Image (tube, grey):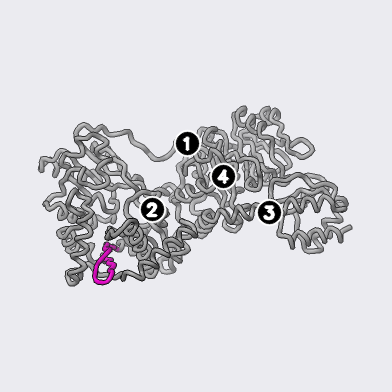
């Protein structure tokens, strides 16, 4: 509801609900938001207030420009009303005119949107899990055996007297406007007379002849979604109203899918509760109030301060193009800005840029894994999704180091660190790992080199071992540069992750991936965990739209299915131990290195002969002999694949 004509129509509905020519009432009559207003000053909640720009219980409205605010304040003065309220403004809007006019934000519940992505059940399963999906389906099935849903165009509601009377009765019983329902008879008539009527349908559920549920569904002006303006349900026992409400929303989802819509707007509400209904887009909203005695707060840009580690050229440029507006929802606008083909379906639209809810899902899922204490202190602002962890490594070198600044690597290690650094004209200092298991970090030599960035692979690829934790802590605490820890394989380790320390150290960055333990190599999803100012620097060099909608859906699906992932990790660990024992006893093998990954580093007798024979047998392993003499890296497969490898090794003797 972003058009002026729609906003004016909602204001007319509010006037009708209040029974007045002007939308004037005290904030205490505004239902669930009353407490938020009263918290400012008890007197604020009781004063007459002119509401401009729609209604507090409606979808959000655009932040008004200065001329509209001047007109609102002029009306308030003419009416002798001491306060003015602009309800439901998205925090992503430009609110500078509101601040300049002396308005103060009052936090409200976020707007909640259920975005359809193909099948309704599949979309729900990836967001709420199989158990919750089953619960919603059962409630819908139980309700469908007792009630019958029907849809009546609002223009035709007068011809359905029983439905109209029941709609009004259900809404007036809720009395969210202090005894006057927002959709009482007068309000419903005003809506039916206005421009929204042509796009609005009354949803009615009947149990026999009795109406037990009634709501209003309004198509968006861009034709891609539907607003669930209200859904009132008869309460005939503990939990009954909740069950029927959830069944009704499921019915709305299914009908939206049948109609080819992209989203259902669920209104404002508690984010936790709405997540349980499948909502996956949450738009922060404020009511803006101007009242005597209220002092405007300082402006909040919503963006973190750029990290001091940002390279000078990066600090001089903004986040590029569309990514700069990632927090500005685009679901309910007519988008004529992207120069795409409008005739070839949803695939012609660019991917969703707002991944905040997916970041929250990632953090909450990973926080439940063993060895991830402290990650709960991170927010979505600490998270950047990249095209695999290797993309994250390239981004941070490009954004945080300038030509001539040293990059430290610790061989043997992942070879692309060195590769990316040299491509970016960054001198590389190699401080090799020490010890029989190649797991000892030479902290003193690294600090002496004074690198801008130190890249650690832990668990190590290709060795498979973990670095000594005390030495890693000493490096983070003792250096002036950035320490980047690539934890691509950490889920296979029984030692803790360093992700929980990111919130405490400005110079620590942790790279993660969903390609390994999470089994999503084809989705190309890496995760950078860093201070928000570092994340902002990386966004300035990241190509927008690299994280596709298909990849986002795959990631959300897999994160919701974490128990299956953890079970597979346990199987890999068990197979790793079996394989390590089998290889250690094999006559072609000199040594098996200890591993906390999903692979084993093996030193071979007759290295070249064995590698040739494996190739001839159609078995691919990574030849690591150039970096670690006479070795290869063997990924853990299933038992059949592992037995094939062992047989090929025997044939090579």
In this picture, is 231 found above or below 483?
A: below
Element type at marker 4? helix
Question: Spatial distance from mark 4 to mark 3, Cα to Cα?
Answer: 31 Å
Task: Indicate which disc, 3 or 2, sits on the residue closer to the N terminus.
Answer: 2
Residue at (73%, 60%) from the top-left corner? 639
Residue at (69%, 43%) from the top-left corner? 460
Residue 395 is tagged as: 4
Q: Give the extent of the magenta segment.
A: 202-218
Q: Which quadrant: the C terminus? A: bottom right
In this picture, is 151 found above or below 522?
A: below
Task: Indicate which disc, 2 or 1, sits on the residue closer to the N terminus.
Answer: 2
Question: Spatial distance from mark 2 to mark 1, Cα to Cα?
Answer: 33 Å
Question: Spatial distance from mark 1 to mark 3, Cα to Cα?
Answer: 41 Å
Element type at marker 3? helix
Question: Spatial distance from mark 4 to mark 2, Cα to Cα?
Answer: 35 Å
Instruction: Say which of marks 4 and 3 sits in front.
Output: 3
Task: Indicate which disc, 1 or 3, sits on the residue closer to the N terminus.
Answer: 1
Residue occupied by mark 1: 306
- Residue 67 appearing in the image: no
Residue 71: image x %, image y %? Answer: 17, 45
Residue at (39%, 58%) from the top-left corner? 114
Residue occupied by mark 2: 274
Q: Residues within 10 Å of mark 4 (few under 14, many from 20)?
A: many
Residue 118: image x %, image y %? Answer: 45, 65
Task: Indicate which disc, 4 or 2, sits on the residue closer to the N terminus.
Answer: 2
Residue 300: image x %, image y %? Answer: 36, 37
Residue 572 is tagged as: 3
Task: Indicate which disc, 4 or 3, sits on the residue closer to the N terminus.
Answer: 4
Element type at marker 1? loop
């Amino acid at each position: 509801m972003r058009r002026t004509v729609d906003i004016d129509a909602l204001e007319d509905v509010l006037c009708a609900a209040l029974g007045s020519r002007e939308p004037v009432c005290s904030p205490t009559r505004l239902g669930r938001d009353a407490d938020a207003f009263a918290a400012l000053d008890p007197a604020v909640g009781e004063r007459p207030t002119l509401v401009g720009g729609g209604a507090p219980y409606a979808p959000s409205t655009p932040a008004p420009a200065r001329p509209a605010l001047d007109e609102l304040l002029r009306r308030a003065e003419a009416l002798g009303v001491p306060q003015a309220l602009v309800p439901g403004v998205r925090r992503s809007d430009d609110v500078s005119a509101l601040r300049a006019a002396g308005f103060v934000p009052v936090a409200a519940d976020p707007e909640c949107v259920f975005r359809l992505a193909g099948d309704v059940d599949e979309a729900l399963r990836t967001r709420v899990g199989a158990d919750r999906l089953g619960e919603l389906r059962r409630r819908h099935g139980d309700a469908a055996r007792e009630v019958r849903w029907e849809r009546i165009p609002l223009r035709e509601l007068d011809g359905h007297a029983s439905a109209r009377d029941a709609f009004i009765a259900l809404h007036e019983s809720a009395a969210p406007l202090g005894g006057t329902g927002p959709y009482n008879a007068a309000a419903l008539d005003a809506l039916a007379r206005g421009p929204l009527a042509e796009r609005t349908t009354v949803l009615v559920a009947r149990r026999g002849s009795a109406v037990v549920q009634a709501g209003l569904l309004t198509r968006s002006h861009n034709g891609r979604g539907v607003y669930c303006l209200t859904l009132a349900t008869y309460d005939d026992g503990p939990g009954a109203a909740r069950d029927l409400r959830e069944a009704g929303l499921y019915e709305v989802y299914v009908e939206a899918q049948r109609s080819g819509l992209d989203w259902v707007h669920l209104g404002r509400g508690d984010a936790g509760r709405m997540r349980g209904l499948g909502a996956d887009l949450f738009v922060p909203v404020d009511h803006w109030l101007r009242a005597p005695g209220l002092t405007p707060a300082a402006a909040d840009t919503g963006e973190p301060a750029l990290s001091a580690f940002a390279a000078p050229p990066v600090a001089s440029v903004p986040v590029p193009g569309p990514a700069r507006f990632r927090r500005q929802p685009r679901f309910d606008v007519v988008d004529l800005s992207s120069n795409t083909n409008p005739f070839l379906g949803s695939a012609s639209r660019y991917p969703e840029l707002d991944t905040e809810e997916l970041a929250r899902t990632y953090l909450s899922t990973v926080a439940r894994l063993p060895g991830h204490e402290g990650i709960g202190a991170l927010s979505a602002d600490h998270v950047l999704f990249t095209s695999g962890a290797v993309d994250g490594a390239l981004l941070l070198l490009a954004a945080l180091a300038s030509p001539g600044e040293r990059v430290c690597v610790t061989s043997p290690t992942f070879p692309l660190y060195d590769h990316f650094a040299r491509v970016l004209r960054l001198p590389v200092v190699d401080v090799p790992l020490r010890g029989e298991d190649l797991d000892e970090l030479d902290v003193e030599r690294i600090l002496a080199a004074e690198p801008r960035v130190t890249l650690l692979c832990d668990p190590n690829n290709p060795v498979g071992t973990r670095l000594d934790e005390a030495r890693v802590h000493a490096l983070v605490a003792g250096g002036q540069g950035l320490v980047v820890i690539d934890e691509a394989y950490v889920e296979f380790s029984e030692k803790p992750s360093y992700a929980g320390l990111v919130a405490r150290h400005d110079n620590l960055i942790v790279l993660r991936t969903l390609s390994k333990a999470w089994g999503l190599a084809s989705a190309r999803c890496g995760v950078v965990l860093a201070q928000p100012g570092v994340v902002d620097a990386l966004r300035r060099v990241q190509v927008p739209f690299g994280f596709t909608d298909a990849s986002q859906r795959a990631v959300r699906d897999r994160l919701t299915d974490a128990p299956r992932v953890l079970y597979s990790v346990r199987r890999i660990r068990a197979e790793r131990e079996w394989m390590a024992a089998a290889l250690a006893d094999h006559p072609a093998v000199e040594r098996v290195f200890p591993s906390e990954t999903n692979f084993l580093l093996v030193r071979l007798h007759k290295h070249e002969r064995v590698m040739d024979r494996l190739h001839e047998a159609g078995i691919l392993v990574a030849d690591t002999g150039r970096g670690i003499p006479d070795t290869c890296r063997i990924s853990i497969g299933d038992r059949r694949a592992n037995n094939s490898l062992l047989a090929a090794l025997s044939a090579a003797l």
